[in-house]
Image: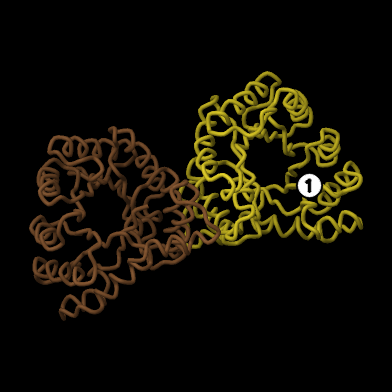
Chain colours: A brown, B yellow
Amino acid sequence: MYAIGERINGMFKSVAAAIKEKNPEPIQDLAREQLKAGAQALDVNVGPAAEDALAAMEWLVKTIREVTEAPLVIDTTKPEVMRRGLEAAGSGSVINSSKGQQEQLDIFVPMAVEHEASLIALTIDENGIPRDANGRGEIALRAVAAAMEKGLPMDRLMIDAVILPVNVTQPTPGHVLEAIRNVKLLSDPPPKTVLGLSNVSQGTRQRELINRTYLVMALAVGLDAAIVDVLDTELMDEMITAELLMNRAVYADDFLKAYRASAAP
Amino acid sequence: MYAIGERINGMFKSVAAAIKEKNPEPIQDLAREQLKAGAQALDVNVGPAAEDALAAMEWLVKTIREVTEAPLVIDTTKPEVMRRGLEAAGSGSVINSSKGQQEQLDIFVPMAVEHEASLIALTIDENGIPRDANGRGEIALRAVAAAMEKGLPMDRLMIDAVILPVNVTQPTPGHVLEAIRNVKLLSDPPPKTVLGLSNVSQGTRQRELINRTYLVMALAVGLDAAIVDVLDTELMDEMITAELLMNRAVYADDFLKAYRASAAP
């Protein structure tokens, strides 16, 4: 699984403070720690509180780039902030994210092509989040069509079927599993699938248990990537084990250690 | 998930000793502990060392019956031992198991009908264990046909797609997931699916991690039942959480406690 570290996000107080004070150390530490823990890419989100989101994104990306060339996942809804982040991060980045309505796809798909980036497309559109797997599939198909039309290779389109907290809407985790499976039938080759995992447990009392259980379920139906807390050791242990059981990593008696050694930057 | 406790098995030394000495206490303790931990049925296996398997099975079942009326899963390859176990356990038991060759099905399917029992049919036949999901599906179909012919209701047929240790054959866990999914397409209503889980981790150094990860993966593709170590708290926590995420149990903030309270005998 392509593990995207979620921790460089202005929603966390320490990250918000570092952005405000232009203090590179906490950010660079988080970058290094997440890569060491098995992240293959790093999500970068300035958070809602950043006063000048454009400057904050540029500073954040450049600060991370001082310590790693790992792919960065530029996490913003604002096209101008996205563009600034992509310019600072370089090719091989990920746009996180476009919604599924045509106007958004018309902005972000060409941006992905221009910046040699991948694109996360959410299965949300002007009508909101679909109630079931079929609704998610319809929006995903729109994203697939946009990618084909604009020349974005299918292995750089990542469909996020939008998980919601299990305590708010209990049928959704099942719908999302079905959608992940269905997305693989939309085209040949199919787009990739990704999840912003932690949302499934928002507001529950067993966040880590719910997160890791749902991640393993999603991997079983073919999930390719997820934005996760890679510093959660139990989650990563189960992710690594699920990869092994899907025959995507070679068995060794100390397979956990072997994975981490190969992941270290 | 229908959780079948695996611990009353003569493979465990304490159980073998209790059988030999006709000492009911360790057996009855294991029955009570497993039911308290969430088992809905108890596997009963006299083990390879029992001198008189017929008498041992009868004693074991009667000893368990003194403390619980929970369904018993009579675990033997020998038809006469199976019959003795079923007679002692009463209706609602489970035959564990028939292989998939016609001669075995011709013995055990009518036995299940006669004793009002369910039947676990393994996807193994005279040619051994199939190399892939399709081979497993073909044998499962033979079991479905036998059940239809002899009048065993489909919800009392349980297909076990036979998991092997991941360190011996790494493609098998994936094949078994595919087979579990395919079995649901064999008939309408479909048969149930079951796994003897612990075999997936045999000989590995991370048995519990591999067991619980694979159980969650199998639940995500529709597994109905498993023979597991219900005394493994982490495994049961994730099983309960996966059920919640599949919308098979109602969310409550303390859903783990709620499940266990409802499971207690």
Q: Quadrant of the C terminus of chain B?
A: bottom right
Q: Amino acid at mark 1?
A: Asn
Left/right placement of residue B13 relative to residue A227 reads: right
Number of other residues with Cα within 10 Å of mark 1, as a class: few under 14, some 14 to 19, many 20 or more = many
Left/right placement of residue B173 relative to residue B46 reads: left
Q: Is residue B105 above or below residue A156?
A: above
Give the x, y percent position of residue B85.
83, 40
Query: Quarter of the image holding residue A167?
Result: bottom left
Residue at image x 35%, y 48%? A224
Query: Quarter of the image holding residue B260?
Result: bottom right
Give the x, y percent position of residue B220.
48, 45
Left/right placement of residue A13 relative to residue B235 reads: left
Q: Secondary structure at mark 1?
A: loop
Q: Is residue B123 or residue B242 the one in the foreground?
A: B123
- Whether residue B156 is visible, yes or no, is no
According to the picture, the residue beneath numbered tag 1 turns out to be B45
Q: Is residue A141 above or below residue B169?
A: above
Left/right placement of residue B36 relative to residue A74 reads: right
Give the x, y percent position of residue A255.
50, 59
Give the x, y percent position of residue B113.
74, 27
Q: Chain of mark 1?
A: B
From this viewpoint, which residue is outermost toward the top?
A: B149
Residue at image x 50%, y 41%? B174
Q: Is residue B186 above or below residue B117?
A: above
Query: Quarter of the image holding residue B131?
Result: top right
Residue at image x 41%, y 62%? A204
